[in-house]
Amino acid sequence: MKTLIRNGSVVTPQGIQAMDVLVDGEKIAALLAPGATSDSLAGSVDRVIDAAGKYVVPGGVDAHTHMELPFGGTFASDTFETGTRAAAWGGTTTIIDFAVQRYGERVQDGLATWHAKAGGNCFVDYAFHQIIGGVDDDSLKAMDELVDEGITSFKLFMAYPGVFYSDDGQIVRAMQQATHNGSLIMMHAENGIAIDVLVAQALARGETAPIYHGLTRPWETEEEATHRAIMLARMTGAPLYIVHMSAKQAVQTLQEARDLGLNVFGETCPQYLYLSLEENLGAPGFEGAKWVCSTPLRSRAEGHQDELWRYLRTNDLSIISTDHCPFCFKEQKELGINDFSKIPNGIGSVEHRMDLIYQGVADGKLSVERWVELCSTTPARMFGLYPRKGAIAPGSDADIVVYDPNGHTSIGLEKTHHMNMDHSAWEGFEIDGHVDVVMSRGTVLVDEQGFHGTKGHGQFLKRDLSQYLI
Ligand code: URP
Ligand code: ZN
Ligand code: ZN
């Protein structure tokens, strides 16, 4: 099967160029200057896609999703089937999900469970990070084994004592192991011990509404943990990637470390760029539960959102992922109706990331090249998938999105999205752009006719070590 994508503007972090893209089988075969060569090929290919007036960009790489994550006595509501279908609709053609080892379990068993959940069920390609919920001799040894199996990054938690939490000694040991095997430590940087005290005190005062989730996780708890994680990484020589950053003070600390030349990186998510403590977590009644996630949404009055956009421009924040962790309102978010600490933490966004961040381009906050870099190319390089993913180049997988900057997307209620959720955290968002065509390894999943993907098309990706580390 050969496809020619014609008349579009190919966008990479390096620039925008009028190029036609020839796809042969699962790979990009050539980039052609529009004109005679391309004209002569058009008659011999199986399909021609006209991308006139549109951007041709590498498929999105969402480096932070949680399909079916066990959390707070329930499970994230998207399966790999529903979640990767929704991802495809939104122009994301690779996800990196988190396999889970809980305290007392073998790491290899946690990984095997994740392979069983995802295998044969995905519409787009997928890879795994591994959550280490119990650092001990066995799990440290397992880290080396997993690196050989293409799981080259490990998430630790400074939050959630008694669930996923690692103490400083455990963090040091895991970082030392990462230094030895070349993998990347990903950190959930919040001081969970301090937070648990604040939570108990708030509940004792009768403060049970969703906004107290945010008020009991003040920016200091994120900044302190970020600083501590950076110091432990510096001490052990481990590279560090801090996930879902929301507090401007924490990113400033990260920026200072990067300016010293430390190998530390930061990720943020659309919710921290657009939503806020006051407007969303503080919505009347129990409504704010829709936006309970950790780290929490931050105050707009304090200006976190604008600062995060700025840090994206300066590359102190290098990646935008979703931290897609959806829960339905009925029976899931409602678990915390009388106690905010029982609201399962997470927001569903895997379908909307490319659009939401494109809106940043339309609003003049990012360049179109930076959109591609933040949402596709850098995640691919950070997590050892480049140039197979994240590139429009000969030899790369033909994961391609044709994006219409003159189109429009309205994000509505559950009927208009494909994630397995009974509400949308993004209801009412209007996007000045539209995902027109989505191709995964040469197969068109989405076009003007609708959805053509097949369950099982998505393959497991064995990842190399991060390409940002030496
Ligand atoms: O609220 C969140 N972020 N839920 C998912 C788990 C995590 O910490 O990433
Ligand atoms: Zn986390
Ligand atoms: Zn997460």
Image (cartoon, grey):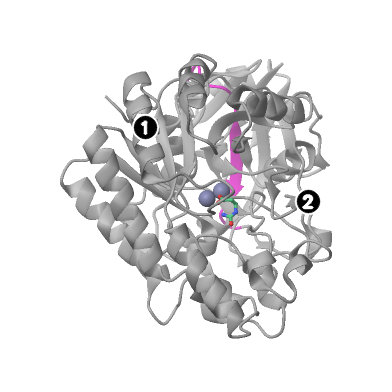
Distance, label 2 to label 1, CA atoms, is 41 Å
- The residue identified by callout 1 is 173
Front-lying residue, 273 or 156? 156
181 with respect to 145 (left or right): left
Q: Can residue 151 be seen in this view?
A: yes
Range covered by the magenta-colored residues: 394-406
Residue 420 sits above or below residue 93 on the image: below
Dot 2 beta carbon under 8 Å from ligand 1: no
- The residue identified by callout 2 is 418
Front-lying residue, 189 or 90? 189
Query: Main structural element of the magenta stretch: helix, strand or loop?
Result: loop
Q: Where is residue 367 in the image (x, y as percent from the top left)?
A: 39, 53
State the SS at label 2. Answer: loop
Residue 27 sits above or below residue 366 on the image: above
Check whether the beta carbons of the residues at disc 2 and disc 1 lie within 8 A of each other.
Answer: no
Q: Is residue 318 magenta?
A: no
Which residue does the image show at 41% across and 22% down from the upper left?
A: 465
Which residue does the image show at 60% across and 78% down from the upper left?
A: 203
